[in-house]
Image (cartoon, rainbow, N blue to C red):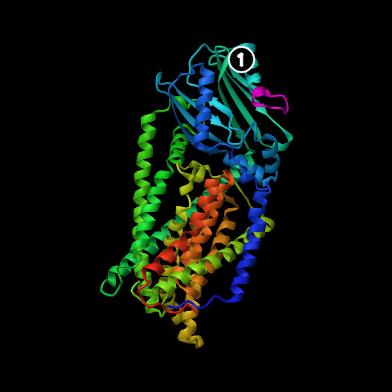
Amino acid sequence: MTISKIAKSLWIASAVGLLVFLATNVVPMVAGNDPSATTHVVDRSGAEQAAEAYVRERTGDAGAELRSFAMYSADRDVFGYFYEAETIADVQKRWSATLPLEAYRVEVEDAGTGAKHWVDVNPYTGRATEWSLGVAGEPVAGGELEAIGRQAIADLGWTGAEPELLWADEDVGEAAYALSDPVFGEASAEVSVRADDLRATAFTVRWIVPESYASRIADQDAKSSALGLIGLLLSGVLQFAAFIYALAQAGSVRWNRGVLMALVFGVFYCAMNVNMYPGLKATMLDLLNGGDYTGIAELDGAGAIAGMIGGLVVTNALTLAMAIGLYFSAVAGDTLAARQGYRLWPQPEDAEYGSHVAAAAKLGYVYAPILLGVQSILFLFAEQGFRTWYTIDALSSPNNMAYPLLAPLLAWCAAVSEEAVYRLFAIAALKRLFAWPLSWALKPLGASKRTVGAVALVGAILLSSMVWALGHVQYPIYPYYTRFAEVTALGLLFAFIFLRHGFLAAVFAHAVVDLIWFGISVVSSAPTAGGFAAFAFYLATPAFVALYVRWSRRDRPAAPIG
């Protein structure tokens, strides 16, 4: 398959798409108008150092041998509540230094005494904002308890309304206070202070959102989870169908198709699963302790470790199953498409293969800004028409990765797997599935075979895009159905690229789009020189791949691009 010379109109559309994307996404971020892109002054490593320093200061043991581990956390519900109420920017500006909506939760263990401490470090200031020290002393009661609690709140930097005492348990030396401010709306913050030996040994903050909002979000999450499960099952059905078809056509399929892609997906994704260890540990702690870490020091460490290991084993097993599904989707899709008259994926042995890969990568860079521009317009339409809002998903954030700079590797995983399953195989398979009933239904109307094929193709493109979109409805964007509509529309565009320019052009375009989004997510919270350098490197990887393939075939005749 020879890719024709890129038309001038396509270059213009790419430039327009880039401008739209920059104006609606990058410029607000740089200008500080994006509440999700607030710069962190510390990363996981810096948070661990800050937590250890805080523990040494509070315990008075400057020479303690400490081991620490940081996890990223965020108040998902309250962030979403403030975002929907359009007060998130004001809340962040006024209270991010005092009551941050995100933090690095650091587990600090004293190797000498075995004591375990927990410290939340404010990512915007590098200071401790919450803590639970694993020390024991005589509980403080009465006026002394209330005085210590109010002083701890004042030390935090609270300048709002006078804290309201909610309750006090003098037996354990703990009291709770409500913090309110007009900018919070109907939400509030509840502070719990535990004190012994005339010192505050635990200080925790719990945000409370209105019940109406919480129940609405719970309903939305339940529906999106159900749709996501349906999408997962349908994806599994597609991949199993590809497996059956490949076996049924074992004598005619090309078994070398997709081997490298499946290996890339399996290796990269399994590595990223391990890289998400901080997020996995945070998940296990939430499950074991209900998300409240006031008494988290008493958790069974062995149980948490066993749960994390089990989680990694299950996750990587599913990843390997997906890699196998990708492989058979590539094998079966290649054969099905060829039998329907589409030559969408040249063989590496073909003389034109090197020039095709190079042209496909070039098209990927040209189409990516168009896709980003369309996506940005869809975002704006959803915001204006459906008042969409979003929140922070801490567990899938690059901040919860051991090595955040590896996050863009997931872009390649998504590109090769989703294009193989939902475009290469699904479109050809669904077109064939639709062709017979459509032929039976349209034949009385005098429809030609070509018309039936065209209608079947349209139905296949639409249904495959919808199944693909179902896998994205669980993203923290509300209402959930706006994400479904947006991704379905993008699926139609990817299908156009796939059918017009071939499978590899769709893969490269998908990779570039996701590399840009992943790169932005990494550098937005920590815009370091290393982060920008990594962003640039990852963005260049499609070109590196194309250049390598072209170079490796330098001794073979190449078909002209135009």
Q: Nearer the viewer, residue 230 or 71?
A: 71
Task: Name the side, left or right, on which 70 lies relative to 556.
Answer: right
Asked if residue 533 can be seen in this view, the reply is: yes
Task: Name the side, left or right, on which 250 lies relative to 365.
Answer: left
Q: Which residues are magenta?
A: 153-165
Q: Secondary structure at mark 1?
A: helix
Give the residue displayed 64% in from the left and 26% down from the top: 156
Q: Point out residue 485 in the picture as x, y percentages from the top left corner.
A: 57, 61
Give the residue displayed 65% in from the left and 12% down from the top: 143
Residue 154 sits inside the magenta stretch? yes
Residue 152 to residue 72: above or below: above
* Other-residue count near label 1 (Cα within 10 Å), few / some / many at <14 / 14–19 / ≥20: many
- Which residue position holds label 1? 145
Residue 491 sits inside the magenta stretch? no
Q: Quadrant of residue 336?
A: bottom left
Residue at the extreme front of the image, as rendered: 555
Q: Point out residue 212 in the picture as x, y percentages from the top left corner.
A: 64, 42
Count up the numbered dots. Answer: 1
Give the residue displayed 65% in from the left and 36% down from the top: 96
Q: Point out residue 250 in the picture as x, y percentages from the top left corner.
A: 27, 71
